Image (cartoon, grey):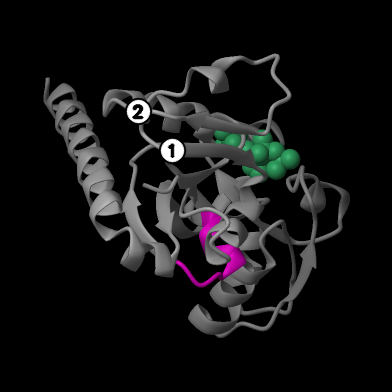
Amino acid sequence: MRYLTFALGKGRLAQQTLALFEEIGITCQEMKDPGSRKLIFVNEELKLRFFLAKGPDVPTYVEYGAADIGVVGKDTIMEEQRKLLEVLDLGFGKCRMCVCGPAQAKELLAHQEQIRVATKYPNIAKDYFYNRKNQTVEIIKLNGSIELAPIVGLSEVIVDIVETGSTLRENGLTVLEEVCPLSARVVVNQVSMKMENQRITRLLQDLNRVVQAREAENAKRGEQ
Ligand code: PRP
């Protein structure tokens, strides 16, 4: 049996993914050591390998088959536009991709003005403004702290992730339009899906069962 290799996006998503894997009996003790500088972790018994990568690199590893399976945010999948199969919504890491700015920028959006849009996600912003809204804008790529851009006059609006909304609130900005909801997704290499179909399908079914149970539990709690 060959190893199935997983690429996980570093950070919060990876921790939640490992917790989910534990629920279906997949553990990787080595990976939990925060002091470790190791890059790749092996579960010999189940013939699984895991590595952590920068989020935007996960779809690249999966497209080229260096990883069979990846776990990464929907935002990254949309932005990277790689050839892969998106097979499961894990239901965590929920947030929204939004157009944000000062409240008065709403007028500029409504009147289809030529505006500047700062973002870490130029492909998502381009698709939203050009294809969905038919609005010509100038897109400025930034690498972080996107909320700064409208405050210091680099752009009129931003396209960015909103989770709790507190970064926006604390900086006098607001959600102007919603682009799409986001969450963590499982992606699979197209060839791996054919060659290792049974193992991957079984794994996805197990994961899906836990995800469904969690959602039912959340819904029940919501009703109470
Ligand atoms: C993300 C995002 C927002 C913030 C949203 O930034 O770009 O800035 O989180 O979260 P909130 O709605 O809960 O405030 P991140 O922390 O990933 O850092 P970055 O600014 O470097 O992208």
What stretch of residues is rendered in magenta?
Answer: 75-84
Type of amino acid under label 1? Leu
* Cα–Cα gap, marks 1 and 2: 9 Å
Residue 48 marker: 1
Quadrant containing ligand 1 reads: top right
Residue 172 % position (x, y): 69, 39
Image position of 1 (left or right of 134): left
User: Mark 2 and mark 1 in contact (Cβ < 8 Å)?
Assistant: yes
Tell me the element at label 1. Answer: strand
Q: Residue at x 59, y 82 (%)?
A: 130
Residue 186 % position (x, y): 40, 50
Residue 198, compared with residue 3, is above or below; it is below
Q: Is residue 149 magenta?
A: no
Tell me the element at label 2. Answer: loop
Image position of 143 (left or right of 36): right
Asked if residue 168 shows in the view, the reply is no
Q: Nearer the viewer, residue 215 or 5?
A: 5
The residue where tag 2 is placed is 26
Question: Which quadrant of the view contains residue 121?
Answer: bottom right
In the rendered image, the residue lying farthest to the front is: 1
Q: Residue at x 33, y 41 (%)?
A: 91
Q: Nearer the viewer, residue 105 or 42?
A: 42
